[in-house]
Image: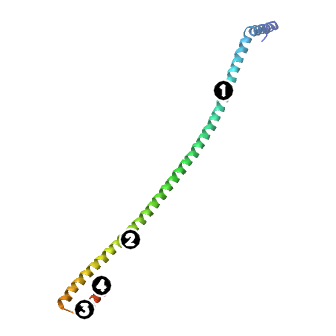
């Protein structure tokens, strides 16, 4: 391979001229395109950083809202539990009061029945006393015997 020096030098000179022509006509455009691309990449990176920061802020805000909602839920649950306990206590108190009331009414009913029974017994005692008196008058007994019969009758009846 014989390469002539003159051809080699001419190739280098032509290459240098092409580079100078390219630099003169296209270098600024190429630098502009590279700068534009660099600005585009920087803008995208900046936007990505901003979006990342916004996402982080939204995440923190959402976590705060979620925590607040959980706390509010706990408060609501506690209030409802307290209301339930209060209703439970009211029901228990009402049941106790109703039981006391029923007991009192039962006592009154028993007392009335007792008085009614005593009245009936007294009524029967009077009736029997009258019957005894009628029998005593029919037999023509003396006053001492009559008193003795009534006293015995009253002792038996328990008046």
Q: Say whether residue 157 is left or right of residue 19.
A: left
The CA distance from mark 3 to mark 4 is 21 Å
> Mark 1 packing: few (<14 Cα in 10 Å), some, or many (20+)?
few
The CA distance from mark 4 to mark 1 is 113 Å
Q: Give the labeled residue for mark 1.
A: 47
CB atoms of marks 4 and 1 within 8 Å: no
Residue lying at 68% horizontally and 26% vertically, measured from the top left: 46
Q: Give the labeled residue for mark 3.
A: 143
Q: Position of residue 120 (x, y in %)?
A: 28, 77
Query: Of label 1 and label 2, which has the lower sequence position?
Result: 1
Q: Position of residue 105 (x, y in %)?
A: 38, 67
Q: Say whether residue 108 is left or right of residue 127.
A: right
Q: Is residue 26 above or below residue 51?
A: above
CB atoms of marks 3 and 2 within 8 Å: no
Residue 107 is labelled as: 2
CB atoms of marks 3 and 4 within 8 Å: no
Between residues 87 and 127, which one lies in front from this camera angle? 127
Q: Nearer the viewer, mark 2 or mark 4?
A: 4
């Amino acid at each position: 391979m014989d390469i002539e020096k003159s051809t080699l030098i001419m190739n280098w000179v032509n290459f240098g001229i092409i580079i100078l022509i390219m630099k003169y006509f296209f270098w600024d455009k190429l630098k502009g395109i590279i700068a534009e691309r660099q600005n585009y990449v920087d803008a995208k990176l900046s936007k990505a950083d901003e979006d990342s920061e916004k996402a982080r802020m939204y995440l923190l805000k959402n976590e705060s809202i979620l925590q607040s909602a959980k706390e509010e839920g706990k408060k609501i649950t506690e209030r409802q539990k307290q209301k339930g306990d209060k209703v439970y206590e009211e029901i228990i108190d009402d049941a106790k009061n109703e039981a006391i009331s029923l007991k009192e009414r039962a006592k009154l009913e028993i007392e009335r029945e007792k008085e009614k029974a005593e009245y009936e017994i007294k009524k029967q005692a009077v009736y029997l006393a009258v019957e005894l008196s009628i029998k005593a008058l029919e037999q023509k007994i003396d006053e001492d015997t009559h008193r003795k019969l009534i006293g015995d009758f009253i002792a038996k009846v328990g008046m």
